Amino acid sequence: MKKLSLSILLIIACSAQIRAQFHTMKIPQASNHVTETQTLGVTDITIDYHSPAVRERDVWNNTDIIPQNANPVAWRAGANMNTTISFSTDVMIEGQFLPAGKYGFHIVPRGDTYELNFAHNNHQWGSYYLDLEKDVTLKVEVSAVEETPFSEKLDYEFLNWTPEEVTVALEWANRRIPFKVSVDLNKTVVESFRSELRGINTYHWQAWNDAARWCLVHNTNLEEALEWANRSVNGGYNGFAANKNAENLRTKAELEQRLGKTAELEQTLSDAIAFIESPYDANFFSIYLLGVKKTDLAMELLDKSIAANPESWFLMLNQAVGYYFQGKEKRALSTMEKVKSMAPANFQDRLTTIEASFKDGTYTIPGF
C-alpha cells in the first residue's frame, strides 16, 4: 500500500513538472521581437528590442506605459526584456566615451529632457530591477526631442549619416528621441585591419593591398600601410601567397611617394612596368615616371599601352607631355590636337590650358 501511494505521488510530481516546463513553439507576440544591425565605418551597432504598439493610447503621457523620473522605475525603451544596444568598437555617445560592449538601454524622462542609460547589466526583464547607480556605465541627457509622423509601432531609426557619425533615434507615436553615435574612424578601422589581417585574410594579397590603400586615401598610418603593401607584394613567411602585380605595386608606389621615399619609389616604378596591362594603371605609372624625370621609360610604357588601347585619350595626353619634356614641341602640340578631338567636352578647357602652357614653356606636372 505504501509503495502504491509513493508511486502515485511520483506520477503526480512528474506530471506537474512536465506541465511547468517551457516549450519552444513560436507564438505570435503583441510586441514583436526586432534585431537590427547597422555599420558605422567598421563599427557594428546592433539594437535588440520588442516593439509595442500604440493601440490608441496616449503613450507619452501615460505613466503606466512610460514611467516619469524613474518613478517607480526607468523605462525599458521597448517592451518585455530590456532593450539592448551593442557596439563592436569603442564609441562616443553625444560626445561621451562608451567602451565596446553590449548594454541594456533604459530611458528616464525628466520633464523636457530624457536621460539615456547604458547599463552593463544588460539581461533584465524590463527595468524593474535596474540599479541606476550601480548598473549603469554611462548616462547621457538629451533634450532635442522631435515631432515625427505618427508611428503605430515603436522602432529605432538610423539617421544623418556621415563617415564618422550617425544619429540613432527611438520613434513611437509622434515623438522621436535621437542621440548621436560617433567613432574615431581612422583608429577603429586601422585596429580592425590589424585584427583581420591576422585571420584568414592574411593569405590574400588583396586584403593587404586594400588595407594599405584605405590608409593611403585617408592619409593615416602610412608607415604601417607601406608594410602592408609590401606584404601584399612579397607574401608572408618564405614568400607564401606573394603576388606582385600592377595593383599592389601602384599602392606601394603611392605610399612611397607620400612618405618621400624617392629611391624606393623609382625602383618600384621600374619593377611595375612588366606587370602593367590596364590603361588606368598605365596612366598612373606613366604620370609618375614623367614626374620623376624618367621620361624615356614613361614613353616606352605609353607606346606599348596606346598600341593596346588606341581609344585611351588620357594616355595620349601623357604621351604629349612626354614629347614636351623631350623638347619635341611640334610633336607634343600635334598629339594634343588628336587628344582634344577624342576627349569628352568637360575636359576641353583643361586641355586648352595645357596646350597653352606647352606653347609658352611653362607646363609642369601637378604634385611634382
Image: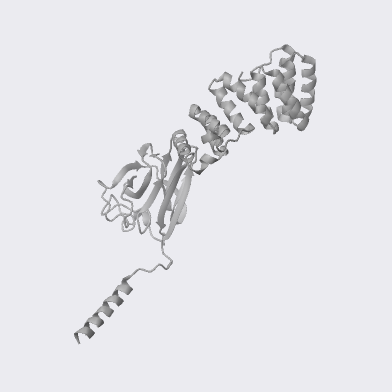
Q: Which of the pair 228/203 is nearer the observer?
A: 203
Q: Quadrant of the C terminus?
A: top right
Q: Position of residue 133 (x, y in %)?
A: 25, 46
Which color scheme is applied?
A: one colour
Q: Position of residue 41 (x, y in %)?
A: 48, 40
Q: Examine the rendering and report whether any part of residue 353 can be seen.
A: no
Q: Quick check: 180 above or below 54?
A: above
Q: Quick check: 364 above or below 273?
A: above
Q: Examine the rendering and report whether any part of residue 59 can be seen.
A: yes
Residue at the farthest front position = 238
Q: Position of residue 233 (x, y in %)?
A: 58, 32
- Residue located 35% across and 57% down the image: 81
Q: Position of residue 104 (x, y in %)?
A: 34, 50
Q: Which of the pair 299/99 is nearer the observer?
A: 299
Q: Is residue 3 rendered to the left or right of residue 53? A: left
Residue at the farthest left position = 2
Where residue 349 sits, quadrant-wise, is top right
Q: Quick check: 137 above or below 340?
A: below
Where residue 16 sits, quadrant-wise, is bottom left
Q: Quadrant of the N terminus?
A: bottom left
Q: Is residue 334 rendered to the left or right of residue 57? A: right
- Residue located 46% across and 49% down the image: 37
Q: Which of the pair 4/35 is nearer the observer?
A: 4
